[in-house]
Amino acid sequence: MKMSERLEEDYRDTLSKLGDELTRQSMQTLLFLFPKVTRAQSSELESLRYNAASLEFFRILEDNEYLSLTNVDVLINALKKRSLFKAATVLENYKRRNVNLINAELQRQYEENQINSSEILNSSSASNSPVKTAWNTNIDTKKKIFISFSFKILDKVTALKDRIERYIGRDSCWICTTGVKGGDNLDEEITQAITGAKIILCMINKDFVNSKQCEAEVHLSRMKNKHFIPVLLEKVEWPLKKPNGDPSPMQLAFARLLYVNLHDQTKKEEEFKKMISSIKEQLGCREQDAVGACGEGENISGNCAAGEVGQCDNPGSSGTKRCHYGALCESCPKKKKAD
């Protein structure tokens, strides 16, 4: 029997045991903890016989990507939140005895995703027609990017945040500057920031992997169905693992995602541009050929909305000014001010 088949068999047996621990009422109550599950789906359980209800409960979670043979942590946390500790133990035992099989399956999914993404990139790069990317200026970008990181690298992350905002717009990123501590209990301000964000940028280093605070932020973001962009600031094992070799609960959020590699100096600039493109796509950027589009943060020696170098606010390393508005020149506030 293949490893994936063994894992699948144990997974289904575990769900059967878990179903024996749950009542139909507890299933309905649990479903309201998952944002993507609708009331209609929850009410479906009421009319079903017990065994059918448990099967439907697990199907709903799987269809909404809250549960899979490699992802049981979200349901474990939900069970504990409702004080269903015996049921949570059933899943914890499954995870503990299958740690090697889960790791192997995650690695397989990751490698498969890398290959598929590579094929897509190769296909898209075949065109020789240059396309400039410009903002849809009706998009509100303020605080739409939540940056999760270890407070030990605050200075480094702050510098990266400032650079991102030169491409996306002022105040587009939110970071915590107070060094919140304490288990899985998130500060209210952080919770609100995650809720309001569209994108979660995870600045990954060894301290991030070991941080309970970062783990809690990732868990909440996953529960709220946010879009993750993992950014590697130093070399770490991927998929993420804890120092003892166990899979990190956070790797489930990143299992099917390509990371941005900013620790490799030979690829840093190229990877940064890919990250900016991904952010723009998620925030609603449109593609069009546009002379004078400053959204890419390029040197603007004459295409500046105000008509000349020196009218935009952010000086580049060479002293040339760079536009930070991320908008077509015709809608740039500097243009309006100059007129």
Image: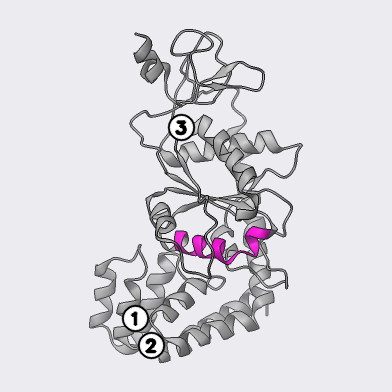
Q: Which residues are magenta?
A: 207-221
Q: Give me the disc on residue 22.
A: 2
In x, y percent, where is residue 112?
Answer: 64, 56
Quadrant hosting residue 260:
top right
- Of labels 3 and 2, earlier in sequence is 2
Per the model, the C-alpha gap separating discs 2 and 1 is 7 Å
Callout 1 touching callout 3 (CB < 8 Å): no
Residue 243 shown left or right of residue 102 in the figure? right
Which residue is at 45% across, 25% downward?
325
Q: Please name which of the two marks, 3 or 2, marks the residue nearer to the observer.
A: 3
Q: Give me the disc on residue 169.
A: 3
Quadrant hosting residue 57:
bottom left
In x, y percent, where is residue 265?
Answer: 75, 38
Residue 138 shown left or right of residue 6 in the figure? left
User: Could you say whether the residue bearing mark 3 is in a helix, strand or loop?
Assistant: loop
What's the residue type where badge 3 is placed? Answer: Gly
Callout 2 touching callout 1 (CB < 8 Å): yes
Residue lying farthest to the front in this orientation: 178
Which quadrant is home to the C terminus?
top left
Which residue is at 61% across, 78% downward?
7
**In this view, 152 is above or below 321:** below
In x, y percent, where is residue 108?
Answer: 66, 63
Q: Give me the disc on residue 27.
A: 1
